[in-house]
Amino acid sequence: MLHWLPEDVSPYGGGIDALFRLIYYLTAAVFLTVTIVMVVFLFWYRHQEGRRATYTHGNTTVEIIWTVIPAAIFIWLGFASKSIWEAIKMTIPPTDTEIRVTAKQFNWEIRYPGPDGQFDTADDKQVDNEVHIPVGKPIRVILKSRDVIHSFFLPNLRFKQDAVPGREIIAWFQANKPGKYEIPCAELCGFGHSGMKGWLHALSTEDYQKWVHEQWPGISSSTPTRAQLAIPEETPLPSSMPPA
Amino acid sequence: MSEAGAIAAHTGHAVYPKELGFLRTYFFSLDHKMIGKQFLFLSLIMLVFGGLMAMLIRWELAWPETPLPLIGASQQFIEKGEPQTGMDQTWQEWLSKDDIEQNWLVKNLPTGAVTASFYNSLFTMHATIMIFFVVMPFLVGGFGNFLIPLMIGAGDMAFPVLNMLSFWVAVPASVLMLYSFFVPGGAAAGGWTMYATLSAKAQYSGVEWGVNLWIISLTILSVSSLLGSINYITTVINMRAPGMTWFRLPLIIWALFITAILLLLALPVLTAALAMLLFDRTMGTSFFLPEGGGEPLLWQHLFWFFGHPEVYILVLPAMGVTSEILSTFSRKPIFGYHAMVFSMIALAFLSWLVWGHHMFQSGMNPALGTAFMLTTMVIAVPSAIKTFNWLGTLWGGNIQFTCPMLFALGFVSNFVIGGLSGIYMASTPVDIYIHDTYFIVAHFHYVVAGIIFGMFAALYYWFPKMFGRMMNERLGKIHFILTYIFFNGAFFPMHFLGVAGHMRRIYNPMQYEFLSHMQWWNQFITYSAFCLFLSQLPFVYNFFWSLFAGPRAESNPWRANTLEWSTPSPPGHGNFAITPTVYRGPYEYSSPLVKEDWLPQDHRLGPEATAAIR
């Protein structure tokens, strides 16, 4: 069933998919064991005239065994998930590429800061539903919404984050392979929810430079440096804190 | 007072006159058994509506924006506008009218194809109806009412008038919910979770009064549930027969008692949230609207603080039913009675601490996500304990494959799948990908729609006690096999769709390129769902035929131990001629003390058996 997972092109998708696989094999093993035991019991202990069922009210030892073992597995799974989750949602790798996505019924409004690296300045560019990013670079994304809750979903990048009106949610994703990837909205947002989608164009470094030149002609190709933007290395995400 | 007098006062025999009029017997009855049956019929009627909505949803997903068979216009008419069939002419006539608001069909199903707005209303109302108007009234209202007094040895509920009111309050709530389809703007279309801000302003969803009626209907229904839960709690605490100690209670009574406590505590949270939502919509407040200083996530916190206990409100009674039936038909005591009771208490307690697992991707602080992941992992443990104890009950049994037993086994099998698939979304990183996809839809249908197996198990098992007649076993088995096959055919492939990333609540999956290779699964699921719907026909026939013409049931057809089987089938008003005395637990099957393989709770053993114990 896992072969239906869409191709993963993200840096953290490997961790997600590995965990998915682990849980898949674990639950499949439990499911098969329980089903086989049940079917065998149903066959062995089917009604036979003159037979009497075993008179027992249970067994404390087996109760303890089948309480402790699942508990240990579940808690271990919890800790295995924790580090992957923190790497995706609670930290952001250093990056100089930033976009702002403002969801609205029923489009993704994409805003690029332009060469000065600042939003809401004259050199900003804004389009609907088309995201252009360089491949192999973390993209810092500021998610906002104008009206209702939407959810920015990138199946191939294993990224999903709700956009909530009244909040600025900061997240990150990265494409490691050039290509064109669909961006559906994953949270019901009204009668036009179905079909609200955009495209992510992950471009090779040369193609991306070409695209930047087309968008901002006459401006030198150099993207602003980290120092200019005052972005510290390895920032913890201030996500989900409402704006002051 | 003489002993007989005390008994009469206790069972309430002195209170009720022998003959009541038609209205007092069938409509405004104070008898818990009649009220239970009223809830049962209400939920069966609503089940038909909820099921039909599911069929429309499935049609749309398999063949998006295509006219329905029989009532839809032909493809040729849609493309060229030239009517050919009779239906084409009817549609042409309807479509040519100026005001489409005047014709409900033209507004919601132009040319017979479901519109996007109507589709959103359909899945919203399908979920709302199935959860609040089918599963809850069937198991909690119906069987809760019918079973609690009978199984604890009481003459009736503690508050018969409250009990009657709890049903008659549920009726207008149901009517209002269905009626909301016919107000301008249509029924609520924000999903059963009704997330703000989509639900908090009419302009966002395009639904004006539909959402208001949804809120009002659920508020009325929560009054009904509150009246019922107060009654259940009081009755179980105060009216148990002599000798019916807490740990001699049947597990279904434990389940219903715990459910009633959850209802009492959870519903006020929903009611408060609903009131705030209604104020936001109609009075200009901003509880959930950021432009006025509100917080959309507040709705999610409140809704899921109610919503997760609600899941256990739905599933605990089905677990109780399953425990009763597995023990009876394995002819064996339930394995680990105390572990079963304490795991239900643990589920109820932990259900208050896991609501955030619905909100991992909501923008809630991700550190909270880790905390909720751990509580969610912990709540899986009591569910695992219950499953293992059910298997332990089968071990060494003398298993009779009756209809109730088959449905109870079906419930266990579905619950195993639903429980295991929950682990995927409990893990926060995996949830990033599968959140809001069909993987979630598959999961909660295995748990919540799987409850229908518990419902059928209960109905086949207690039908003889309720109506005094037996149901047909052969038809019941056909019903089971078809339902089991098509249930899995309909819901298991939804996992595959989820793995491929198929979002839930989308009107037309073919709008997405990355889903195009999965569309045949959507069609497979739809065929299975249609067959699942048709598989209920043997049940409908069996139910009504048995109701009027089934063979008369004896008082204890299944040779079961619990107190309801010591009354006549059906029991008279007041239930017990004399209050039973309880001597032992409910699951003394194949006891070495007696020759038979059952030993009723109220059966007093002679001196020789008592000597054998020592």
Image: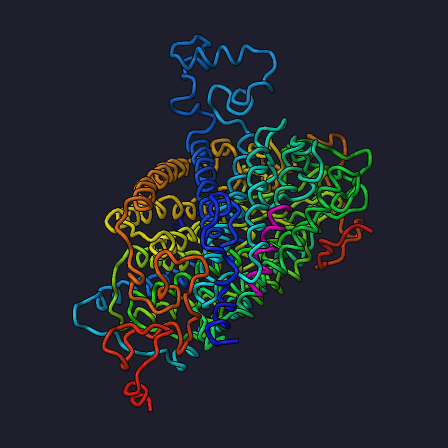
Instruction: From the top left corner, tell me how far across and down residue B429 is, in percent.
Output: 55, 57
Place residue B351 in its image quadrant. Answer: bottom right
Instruction: Report whether residue B508 is seen.
Output: yes
The span shown in magenta is: B219-234
Is residue A51 one of those drawn in magenta?
no
Is residue B225 one of those drawn in magenta?
yes
Give the residue displayed 34% in from the left and 73% down from the top: B333
Instruction: From the top left corner, tell me how far across and down residue B421 is, in percent.
Output: 45, 56
Q: In the rendered view, would you say B54 is above or below A138?
A: above
Place residue B173 in its image quadrant. Answer: top right
Instruction: Report whether residue A29 is seen.
Output: no
Give the residue displayed 48% in from the left and 71% down from the top: B7
In this orientation, which residue lies closer to the viewer: B153 or B169?
B153
What residue occupies the far front of the structure in this picture? Answer: B2
Colouring method of the image? rainbow
Q: In the rendered view, would you say A192 is above or below B427?
A: above
What residue occupies the far bottom of the structure in this picture? Answer: B614
In this orientation, which residue lies closer to the viewer: B274 or A153?
B274
Instruction: From the top left corner, tell me how far across and down residue B191 is, in percent.
Output: 58, 41
Q: Is residue B585 left or right of residue B607?
A: right
What residue occupies the far top of the structure in this picture? Answer: B82
Magenta stretch, main secondary structure, is helix
Q: Is residue B342 left or right of residue B84?
A: right
Quadrant of the image containing the C terminus of chain B: bottom left
Total count of labels: 0
Q: Is residue A48 left or right of residue B194?
A: left
Instruction: From the top left corner, tell me how far across and down residue B340 is, in percent.
Output: 45, 71
Q: In the rendered view, would you say A241 is above or below B506?
A: below
In this orientation, which residue lies closer to the viewer: B601 or B430?
B601
